[in-house]
Image (cartoon, helix red, strand yellow):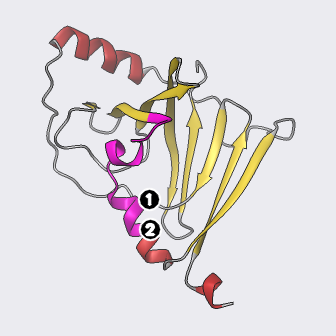
């Protein structure tokens, strides 16, 4: 099966509405340590950073998930694993989440204590510990914010794991 040799399967597991694991591809990547330019006031920015610093994941490594419901979906992409991996390494959040159902709102780098909003010119690629906030559009009437944190990046196995926030 030649297609299986040259493609990657992306497996999406949703462990209830509050947590999920996504096996795809990503890497922390090296990017410039540039603070984002923003029109928002300094106090508003500090408030957002403080809130994101308090982010609590809904599950932790080792938690018993046997009682959780899950949804599993597989995708086959007709490209080499490294090509797909590199695409995920280099995608910016405002490109990854730009569609009719969701949009990128902001992200917070815990390791650098930096906030990046959707208007930032230097958005970092995915990194371990990064907290993302998205706007989800539900039935074109409701706009809901959702937050999740990158909890594992495994380059060897091409895995990105993320967990939704406990307060979502």
Q: Is residue 47 magenta?
A: no
Q: Is residue 94 above or below residue 51?
A: below
Query: x, y (%) of residue 124?
Result: 27, 46
Give the residue displayed 44% in from the left and 59% down from the top.
Answer: 26
* Magenta region, residue range: 85-102
Q: Which residue is mark 2?
A: 85
Residue 102 appears in the rendering: yes
Q: Which residue is mark 1?
A: 26
Query: x, y (%) of residue 163?
Result: 58, 37
- Callout 2 touching callout 1 (CB < 8 Å): yes
Sequence order check: which comes first, mark 2 or mark 1? 1
Counting labels gives: 2
Q: Is residue 119 above or below residue 29?
A: above
Q: Secondary structure at mark 2?
A: helix
Query: x, y (%) of residue 165?
Result: 56, 27
Q: Is residue 65 above or below residue 117?
A: below
Query: x, y (%) of residue 104?
Result: 38, 35
Q: Is residue 90 magenta?
A: yes
Query: Dot 2 surroundings within 10 Å: few (below 14), some, or many (20 or more)?
Result: some
Give the residue displayed 25% in from the left and 43% down from the top.
Answer: 123
Alpha-carbon span between mark 2 and mark 1: 6 Å
Res. 133 image quadrant = top left
Give the residue displayed 34% in from the left and 48% down from the top.
Answer: 95
Give the residue displayed 30% in from the left and 11% down from the top.
Answer: 47
82 or 150, nearer to the observer:
82
For the C terminus, the quadrant is top right
Res. 63 image quadrant = top right
59 or 5, nearer to the observer:
5
* Left or right: residue 22 compared with residue 36: right
Q: Secondary structure at mark 1?
A: loop
């Amino acid at each position: 099966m030649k297609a299986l040799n040259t493609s990657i399967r992306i497996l999406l597991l949703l462990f209830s509405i509050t947590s999920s694991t996504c096996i795809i591809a990503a890497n922390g990547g090296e990017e410039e340590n540039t603070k984002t330019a923003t029109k928002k006031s300094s106090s508003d920015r500090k408030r957002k950073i403080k809130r994101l610093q308090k982010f609590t994941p809904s599950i932790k490594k080792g938690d018993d998930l046997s009682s959780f419901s899950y949804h599993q979906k597989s995708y086959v992409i007709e490209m080499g694993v490294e090509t797909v991996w590199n695409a995920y390494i280099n995608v910016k959040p405002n490109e990854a989440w730009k569609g009719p159902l969701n949009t990128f709102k902001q992200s917070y780098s815990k390791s650098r204590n930096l906030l990046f909003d959707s208007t930032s010119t230097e958005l970092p690629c995915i990194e371990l510990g990064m907290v993302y906030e998205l706007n989800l559009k539900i039935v074109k009437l409701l706009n809901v914010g959702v937050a999740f944190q990158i909890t594992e990046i495994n380059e060897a196995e091409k895995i990105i794991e993320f967990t939704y926030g406990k307060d979502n």
